[in-house]
Image (cartoon, rainbow, N blue to C red):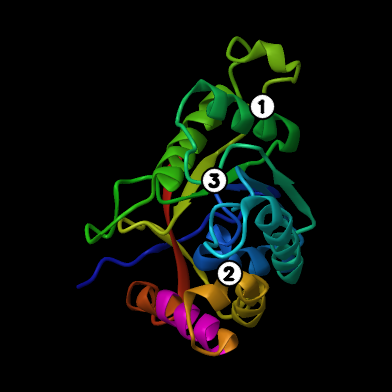
Amino acid sequence: MTQQLEPMPTDWRRALAVVAHPDDLEYGCAAAVAGWTDEGREVAYLLVNRGEAGIDTIAPSACAPLREREQRASAEAVGVSSVEFLDHRDGVIEYGTALRRDIAAAVRRHRPELLITLNHRDTWGAVAWNTPDHRAVGRATLDAAGDAGNRWIFPELGLEPWDGVRWVAVAGTDRPTHAVDATPGFERSVRSLLAHRTYIEVLTDEDPEAYCRTFLAGTTGAAAERFGGRPAVAFEVFPR
């Protein structure tokens, strides 16, 4: 029998999602976010860059503000109003203390119990190579959960430590342990991904809404077998 995924923990009030680029959350876990905000939970987004190198036909100086606007609209579609951007360069994010410091600072400001990020491993399902940005940000987020709680790490931030992160949940993993029912938030997750229209229209000749709906139905449906037949957003959860 296929091992079933556990329901995500529900005894929390605040979450912070940290990813590299605009659209990373929309391709991964926006349906879960929509369900959480419906329940009155606070979810904030931290984007490590503005996706300025993501569209070949648009120069970075013009692309960055466009993708930032689309990300804010995307977050609004699932009930997220707090969206922050760092200034690490798209495509060349480096794992290291500078990145850990920036993420730890956000954790100390937002004081989440749940920290969310994207696949930090070398590949997607041992098939496709993951990007350096995803790997760096995912790993730095896992590390920053501990950094944020240690007052002697990054004391120059001038922020009180926060040791209240209880879980780090990784989306887009091939080793999921937990899941969230995607059904309540599915339609809003489609709208959330569709808000990245400029990026999507470069990726595909398909109708953008059809593309978003098909992609998200596929990813949430893939987890259904391990979640009682319900479409789901799957996470690998690291308790702390």
The three-letter amino acid code for the residue at tag 3 is Asp
Looking at this view, name the residue that lies furthest to the left: 1
Per the image, the residue denoted by label 1 is 162
Counting residues from the N terminus, which is met first, the one under dot 3 or under dot 2? 3
Distance Cα–Cα, label 1 vs label 3: 28 Å
- The residue drawn where x is 66% and y is 63% is 36
In x, y percent, where is residue 203?
48, 74
Q: Is residue 83 visible?
A: yes
Based on the displayed image, in which of its 4 quarters is residue 188 positioned? bottom right
Classify residue 126 as left or right of residue 135: left
State the extent of the magenta-drawn residues as a range.
210-219
Camera-near label (1 vs 2) is 2
Q: How many marks?
A: 3
Whether the magenta-drawn stretch holds residue 103 is answered as: no
Q: Residue at x 55, y 90 (%)?
A: 207
Amino acid beneath label 1: Trp
Q: Residue at x 74, y 55 (%)?
A: 65
Type of amino acid under label 2: Tyr
Residue highlighted by disc 2: 199
Q: Earlier in the sequence, mark 1 or mark 3?
A: 3
Give coordinates of residue 41: x percent, y percent: 73, 57
Label 1 – label 2 distance at C-alpha: 36 Å
Q: Position of residue 211 (x, y in %)?
A: 50, 84
Residue of label 3: 90
Q: Residues within 10 Å of mark 3 (few under 14, many from 20)?
A: some
Query: Is residue 57 positioned above or below 161 on the image?
Result: below
Our reading of the magenta stretch's main secondary structure is: helix
